[in-house]
Image (cartoon, grey):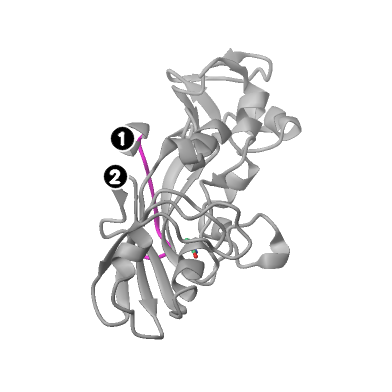
Amino acid sequence: MSALRLDQLLSRYGYCSRREAVAWLADGRVKAEGQLLSRSDQKMKPEGVLIDGEPVEFPAGLLIMLHKPCGYACSHDAAESPLIYDLLPPRWMRRNPGPISIGRLDRETSGLLLITDDGALSHRLTSPRHDVEKCYEVTTSAALPAGLESLFAAGDLMLRGENKPCLPARLEVTGGHTARIYLREGKYHQVRRMFASQGCPVTALHRSRFGQLSLDGLAEGAWRAVGVAELG
Ligand code: URA
């Protein structure tokens, strides 16, 4: 990260406003290498700065995975509360840029959701050209018909309102009403619409993998930091 004025640094990472930074610095809350930092116009790299004795959080940018529970909307609009952002430390909402989800899961879908403050990374991972495989565990109200694997694998399933067919998708049927589907794209409500188009409304949907990443025992509602190298 490049050096920033300390008042900019404190507000960029969500600690306080630039105006409040003057008081934070005067109160001795900001240090580096054991020295108090008191001038708001002093430029520092965030790595190595301690605020109330703690290193600046995610100085190189935020990247986490959240185990999204059902019932939370992937939105910043408070009218849609509860929001996935309610599950994260409030300070992160004051970062600038602030956190955004990498793609979305429906309110009633649970599972692995990546969240970042890096718009370019989000764009890259959601672009169809990037080709990240996502895995979903599906439960349906109707019994799954025979031949669904080859139908989804053919790459010619046209969903209502779309002008291109779904890309070939791998399906593993795991029970009479349960399956695992691997997608390399993310049309609106795609999994629900694919199964509904075959007379099988989805009653539960959970994303278990995003590329190489899996939840690996992360509790529902909990998050953990992700290293960029883990994205593969
Ligand atoms: N497909 C859906 O239908 N819903 C999701 O949340 C994700 C994929």
Q: Secondary structure at mark 2?
A: loop
- Disc 2: which residue: 212
Q: Is residue 146 above or below residue 154?
A: below
Q: Is residue 37 above or below residue 192?
A: above
Query: Where does the image place residue 158, in percent across and percent down from the top left?
Result: 52, 61
- Disc 1: which residue: 232
Mark 2 Cα shell of 10 Å, populated few (<14), some (14-19), many (≥20): few
Q: Is residue 185 left or right of residue 134?
A: right
Are the two marked residues, 1 and 2, in contact with CB atoms closer than 8 angstroms?
A: yes
Query: Where does the image place residue 229, in percent across and percent down from the top left?
Result: 32, 32
211 or 52: nearer the eye? 211
Report if residue 208 is visible in the image: no
Query: Where does the image place residue 61, in percent across and percent down from the top left?
Result: 49, 32
Q: At label 1, which amino acid type do we have? A: Gly
Report if residue 166 is visible in the image: yes
Q: At label 2, which amino acid type do we have? A: Gln
Residue at (39% x, 86% y) in the render: 142
Residue extent of the magenta highlight: 219-227
Earlier along the polypeptide chain: callout 1 or callout 2?
Answer: 2
Mark 1–mark 2 Cα distance, whole angstroms, equals 7 Å
Query: Where does the image place residue 56, in percent across and percent down from the top left?
Result: 49, 32
Q: Quadrant of the C terminus?
A: top left
Q: Quadrant of residue 208?
A: bottom left
Q: Secondary structure at mark 1?
A: loop
